Amino acid sequence: MTQAPVRPDQPGTHADEADILDLAREKVLERGEPLTQAETLSVLQLGDDRLTDLLQLAHDVRMKWCGPEVEVEGIISLKTGGCPEDCHFCSQSGLFTSPVRSAWIDIPSLVEAAKQTAKTGATEFCIVAAVRGPDKRLMSQVAAGIEAIRNEVDIQIACSLGMLTQEQVDELAAMGVHRYNHNLETARSHFPNVVTTHTWEEREGTLRMVREAGMEVCCGGILGMGESLEQRAEFAADLAALNPDEVPLNFLNPRPGTPFGDLDVLPASDALRAVAAFRLALPRTILRFAGGREITLGDLGAKQGILGGINAVIVGNYLTTLGRPAEADLDLLVDLQMPIKALNDSI
Ligand code: SF4
């Protein structure tokens, strides 16, 4: 059977694909303007044969609008597991059979972790708790932890403690928390398929209070949770509307015992295409590789991502899964001649 010849102006042909990259070069690289949702979708629909060009463009955009520095962060879980929420990707939910049990770490261990993080050259240390939102006990542990770290370690402190009340936002700002992480996780239209115990709008409300209180907003999510390409583009636009200081991009690492435990891992080319598309939708934002990249992208992934739009990494282990050794990422940055962002650049 012979196929009808493909006209160069048909959707999805190479002529179209070249057009979106030309448009992105002119709009994002030259003028620093973000792609729209529809344009981001066109990028996500590019074929694998255009991936190298796309990654190069995303890298050029990152170098022009963010510079060569890479921001390094360490994270520590103050309270692990036993969360009452049902985020379907999360092994820390107490509602699933996943093997993460509830546990707290003490203040000396927190300070030690901050010291180790600072030794890598990292500028941010993020204190994380698996909770819907903090209670009085957690807030007082965080206050004590921040004070102890401040006394011994020169590092900026971020927190990720779930949904906040206005009073809690004000307390964290008064403690000197530099940045607050609260992920929207996925597109608004896909969120009810991922979480049923709270809403996307509740999450967004916390982020708005954080911004108004003067803390930096860190907000990202997880790719590969069954969202369509349209929803991936919608998510990038949702994030761009918030104008976050940082976007951590995770890739689903399906955890046994969670509702998403049987989902397929995102193919490496889809993950890299998404990283580049998010860079073009968020040209000036710190775009951080977070969890799941080892399983999605393998050993080469760090290099391809850092040369494809990423400008921040988490060193060491994640909350419930192992990452690459800190030295591997730091050596890579030396190889690529990308300096670690210095503490005094950002304060
Ligand atoms: S993602 Fe956060 S809120 Fe959701 S179950 Fe996990 S720890 Fe709880």
Image (cartoon, rainbow, N blue to C red):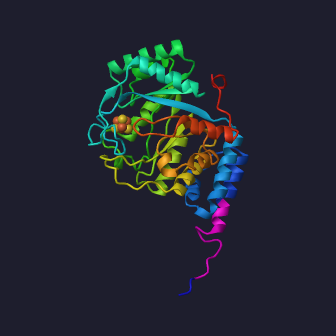
* Residue 324 spot, x, y in % from top left: 51, 40
Q: Quadrant of ligand 1?
A: top left
* Residue 203 spot, x, y in % from top left: 41, 36
Give the camera-side residue of 223 and 196. Answer: 223
Give the camera-side residue of 16 and 305. Answer: 305
- Compared to residue 226, the image places residue 99 above or below, namely above
- Compared to residue 117, the image places residue 151 above or below, namely above
Q: Residue at x 59, y 47 (%)?
A: 305
* Residue 111 spot, x, y in % from top left: 47, 19
What range is drawn magenta here? 4-19
Quadrant of the snapshot with the C terminus: top right
* Residue 243 spot, x, y in % from top left: 56, 37
* Quarter of the image where one finds residue 155: top right
Residue at the extreme right: 30
Query: Does 248 appear in magenta?
Result: no
Q: Residue at x 73, y 47 (%)?
A: 30
How many numbered discs sit on the rendered protein? 0
Say if residue 199 shows up in the picture.
yes
Residue at the extreme top: 151
Query: Does 11 appear in magenta?
Result: yes
Give the camera-side residue of 214 and 275. Answer: 275
- 298 relative to 33 in the view: left or right: left
Say if residue 243 shows up in the picture.
no
- Compared to residue 46, the image places residue 181 above or below, namely above
Q: Main secondary structure of the magenta part?
A: loop
Q: Residue at x 68, y 51 (%)?
A: 57
- Compared to residue 289, the image places residue 206 above or below, namely above
